[in-house]
Image: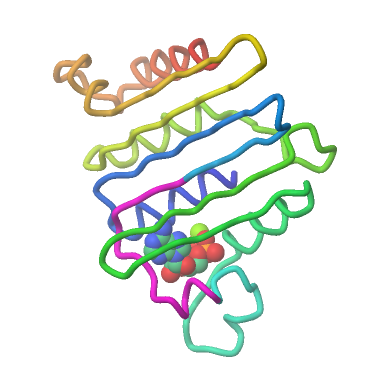
Amino acid sequence: MHIMDILQNSTRAKAKNITLEVLEDILADTLTLVFKDDGCGMSEEMVRNVVNPFFTTRTTRKVGLGLPLLKQNAEMTGGSVEIRSKEGEGTLVTAVFGLTHIDRPPMGDLPGTLVLTIAAHPEIHFVFHFGRSNSDNDTDYVLDTDELYEALDGVSLQEPEVMAYIKEMVAENIR
Ligand SMILES: Nc1ncnc2c1ncn2[C@@H]1O[C@H](COP(=O)(O)OP(=O)(O)O)[C@@H](O)[C@H]1O
Ligand SMILES: [Mg+2]
């Protein structure tokens, strides 16, 4: 749900290119999520305050709970959230979780989340990178919608069968 929410921030920010990295580091025992977009970005003041859920009640600006909750959940697992942003250029959100920490929210349906997000925004170029590094074997999988649309060759991703197929392909590759 965090992933869906933070990706939605980027789509709402009118990003044309969005990348998400999901990196499991077994040795370091971390799960790192890196969201990068070229959307409208945020001012320095906004970046400073956006993780504070109470900031919104004292201003006219409407702020939700997406980033504060992400930060709270990451910190509960010994991790952290860092936000870098520049107005007119884009935003980088990095969230680190303790991979095996008992309070880490479960990953849930990552393939389903990614495919739904892609299908809802055919105009956006998404790159999803999934990596798992272990002591003796590494997994790397990249889903790039430019390549996906080329392979689909005009077949719509909105077709339920196509979505199910892509979801299964992503799930298979992550496994
Ligand atoms: N990637 C982003 N690009 C530009 N603005 C962002 C981005 N992420 C968050 N914001 C700004 O921060 C606000 C708070 O985000 P969030 O905590 O997820 O709550 P919500 O999305 O419900 O408003 C957003 O409404 C938006 O103004
Ligand atoms: Mg949000």
Which is nearer the eye, 5 or 139? 139
Q: Nearer the viewer, residue 130 or 27?
A: 27
Instruction: Name the side, left or right, on which 153 lies relative to 53.
Output: left
- Spot occupied by residue 14 in the image (x, y as percentages of width and height): 28, 57
Tell me which residue sits at (40%, 38%) in the image. 117
> Residue reaching furthest left?
154
Residue at x-position 39% and y-position 23%: 142
Q: Up-down: is 4 above or below 173?
A: below
Say if the magenta span includes residue 156: no
Question: Residue 13: x, y in percent?
Answer: 33, 60
In the image, is residue 45 part of the stretch drawn in magenta? yes
Q: Nearer the viewer, residue 25 or 129?
A: 25
Q: Position of residue 101 (x, y in %)?
A: 81, 38
| The residue positioned farthest toward the front in the image shown | 135
Query: Which quadrant would the C terminus be assigned to in this image?
Result: top right
The residue that appears at 21% across and 42% down in the rendered structure is: 123
Magenta range is: 35-48
User: Eyeballing the image, is 91 above or below 2?
Assistant: below
Q: Is residue 103 above or below residue 66?
A: above
Quarter of image, res 67: bottom right
Colouring mode (rainbow / by chain / secondary structure / one colour): rainbow
Q: Is residue 55 left or right of residue 154?
A: right
Quarter occupied by residue 135: top right
Q: How many marks?
A: 0
- Residue at the farthest right position: 102
Indicate the position of residue 69 as horizontal and vertical percent values: 66, 59
Q: Residue at x 53, y 75 (%)?
A: 48
Image quadrant where one finds the N terminus: top right
